[in-house]
Image (cartoon, coloured by chain):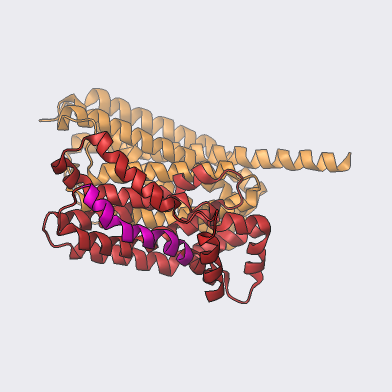
Chain colours: A orange, B red
Amino acid sequence: MSLWEYANPVKFMALSGRVLPWAWAIAALTLGTGLIWGFFFTGDADKFGSSVKVIYVHVPSALMAINAWFMMLVTSLIWLVRRHHVSALAAKAAAPVGVTMTLIALITGALWGQPTWGTWWAWDPRLTSFLILFLFYLGYMALWSALEDTDAAADLTSWLCIVGSVFAVLSRYAAKFWSQGMHQGTTLPVATGGRTISDIYFYPLVLAMVGFAALFVALVLLRTRSEINQRRTAALIARKRGAA
Amino acid sequence: MKALLLRDLRLAVRAGGGFGLALAFFLIVTMLVPFAVGSDSQTLARIAPGTLWLGALLACLLSLERLFALDYEDGSLDILATAPIPLEGAVIAKAAAHWLTTGLPLTLAAPVLGVLLHLPGPGYGVLMLGLALGTPALSMIGAFGAALTVGLKRGGLLLSLIVLPLYVPTLIFGADAASRAAMGQGASTPLLLLGAVTLGCLALLPFAAAAALRVNLR
C-alpha cells in the first residue's frame, strides 16, 4: 500500500469519488460557519471599521493562490519524474482554480485598500508579486490550451511551472528590493507560532482558511476527475473510429 | 558549437535575417516616448533609464520567435539534436548568437538614445554596463520561451505572455541600477544582483530549454 497506487486512474477515480462529497461538506460547513461568524458576529476593528471583514476572504484566497501554484509545482515534478498522467492532469486542473484565487485576493485587496490606504492599488512588493503570479498562471494556462498533443503539453507546462516557480520567488525578492512595502506583514507567522491578531478575528479566520482549502481540494478533485473522464471519452471515440 | 554560432550569426546578418530590426525598433520606441509624455527634459531625464531598459527588453523579444522556429521547420533542429554536441550546448550557441545580434547592438546603441532622452551624465556607464550584464539573461530566458513554443503555428503572442513575466527580475535590477547611477548614487548592489540573475539563467536555463526542445522534437 503506497501513495503511488493512486497514480492508477481507476484507483484515483474510486478514491476521489469517495473523498469528493466529504471535501464539499467540509468546505460548505467551515466556509459557511467561518464567513457568517466573521461577517455578522465579530465587531468592527479600531482604525479599520467594518472593512476588517474583508480579511475572511482576502487572506484565505491569497493563501490558496500561492499553495495552488506550489501544488502545481509538486505535481509537475511528479509527472516529469514518474510519468503519472493523473499528476499532470491534477496540475492542469489546479491552474484555473489558482488563478481565480489570485484574482479574488487581488480584487478583495483593492476593495480593502480603498478605505484603509486611500487607494485601490499601490506598487507594493506583495501586490506586485501577486500580479506577477497572476500573469504566470495566465501563461501556464495559455500554454496548456495552445498545445494539442496532451503528453507534450504536460511536459512543456511542467517545465514552465518549474522555471516559473524559480522566477516567481526571484520576482518576489526583486520586488521587495525595488520598493518599500505598504502592505502589513503576516499576522499569522507560522515559523514563530505567535500571532498579532485578536482571538475574536482569529477563530473565524482559521475556519475560513480551512474552508478555502477544502473548497480548493474539492474543485481540483472535481476538475481532475472531469479531465480523466474527458480523456477516457476521447480514447473510446478513437477506439471506435479505429474499429469502424 | 562555434560552427553553429557562426552559422547563426551569418544567417542573421544576411538579408532577411532580421538583424537591425531590433535596433530600429529600439529607436522607434525611444522616439515615441517623448511624444507620449511630453518633451520636458526633466521628465525625460527621470524616466530615461527605465524607458531605455524597457525598449531594449521589447526589442529583444521581437526576434525570439525565429530563434528556433526556422530550424524547426526545415528540420535542421532534428540534425542538431542528433549532433555530437549536446542539445544544451546548441541552445547556448543559439542564445549567444541571439545576444550578439540583438543584446550587444542594443547595449552599444543605448547611450546614443540616452542623449535623445536627456539621460544625466553619470548614468551612461552604468546603463551600458547593466545592459551588457542583463541582456544575456534576456536572450537565455527568451531561448527557453522559444523552445517551449517552437511547435506552435502562431506562438508569437503566447511567447510574449510567457517570457515577459520572466523578465521582471532582470528589468527591476537593470533599470534600478541605471536610475540610481543617473541620480548620482552608487549602483553596485543592483548591478551585482543583475549579474547573479544572468549567471543563474546561463547556468540553469539551457537544461530546461533543451528539455523543452526534446519534447517538441519527439
- Where does residue B128 sit, x and y in percent of width and height? 27, 62
Task: Please give the name of the residue rendered at 61% of the width and 37% of the height, measured from the top-left corner.
Answer: A226
**Is B114 inside the magenta-drawn segment?**
yes
- Residue at image position (44%, 67%) is B204
Q: Residue A114, relative to residue A242: is it above or below?
A: above
User: Which is more toward the observer, B45 or A115?
Assistant: B45
Nearest the eye: B130 or A7: B130
Please indicate, yes or no, whether residue B27 appears anywhere in the rendered image: yes
**A33 with respect to A124 (left or right):** right
**Quarter residue A63 falls in:** top left
Give coordinates of residue B45: x percent, y percent.
Answer: 17, 47
Quadrant for the C terminus of chain A in the image: top right
Decide: is B100 above or below A92.
below
Position of B57 with respect to A48 (left or right) is right
Tell me what residue is drawn at x 32 percent, y 31 percent: A107
Residue A5, position in %: x, y? 61, 56
Of residues A159 and B60, the one nearer the viewer is B60
- In the picture, residue B123 is in which quadrant? bottom left
Q: What are the residue bounds of the magenta stretch?
A: B96-117
